Structure formats: C-alpha cells, structure tokens
Amino acid sequence: MSDLNATFEEAVKNSTALSERPDNATLLKIYALYKQATEGDNEPRNPALPTWWAVRGTRGKSSDTTQDEAKQQYIELINSLR
C-alpha cells in the first residue's frame, strides 16, 4: 500500500513537469482523479440546499472508483502524458 502512495506522490510531482500542457478534458480528468484519490467521494457542501443546487458546480461522486483505484488511474494517466 505504501508503494502505491509513494508512486502516486511521484506522479503528482511529475504532473507539473509535463512536456506539453494537456487539453482541458484531460486536465479535468487529472483533477477529478486527484481529488478522488486524496479526498474520496465528494459530499454536498450544504445539505440545506436543494440537491440540484448542492451538486451543481461540484465534482460529484466519481462513479464507484475507490481512492486506491483513482491513485492507480492517476499514475497511469500522468505516465502516459510524459
């Protein structure tokens, strides 16, 4: 498990040194995987707001991806961009 975390941290460092800037769709994927890997599923910030408003503009639940799966996907994506 610690190997995955170390490899993930290395990929995070490598993400700032990519040879080309990824397109916006790829940047969003990188961000979503990073947030899923580091924070897990997103919960609405204010439960008093209607559901449609609480989810609007937020990352939302990233399917059924676990934090470890998100880390592995992040690592693979960053490595493919290098």
Image (spheres, rainbow, N blue to C red):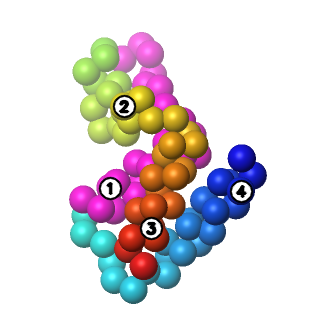
Report the amino acid beneath label 4.
Asp
Range of residues picked out in magenta: 25-49
Of the numbered discs 4 and 2, the one sitting upstream in the chain is 4
Q: Which residue is mark 2?
A: 63
Query: In x, y percent, where is residue 13?
Result: 59, 72
* Tag 4–tag 2 contact (CB < 8 Å): no
- Per the image, label 4 sits on a secondary structure element best described as helix
Real-space CA distance between mark 4 and mark 3, rounded to the nearest whole angstrom: 17 Å
Query: In x, y percent, where is residue 11?
Result: 56, 67
Of the numbered discs 3 and 2, the one sitting upstream in the chain is 2
Q: Which mark is residue 61?
A: none
Say which residue appears at 52% left-offset and 35% top-offset. Answer: 66
The reply to whether the magenta stretch includes residue 42 is: yes
Q: Which mark is residue 3?
A: 4
Of the numbered discs 1 and 2, the one sitting upstream in the chain is 1
**Split into 4 quadrants, where in the image is the C terminus?**
bottom left
Real-space CA distance between mark 4 and mark 2, rounded to the nearest whole angstrom: 25 Å
Report the amino acid beneath label 2.
Ser
- Per the image, label 1 sits on a secondary structure element best described as helix
Real-space CA distance between mark 3 and mark 1, rounded to the nearest whole angstrom: 13 Å
Q: Main secondary structure of the magenta part?
A: helix
Q: Which residue is mark 1?
A: 28
Real-space CA distance between mark 4 and mark 1, rounded to the nearest whole angstrom: 25 Å
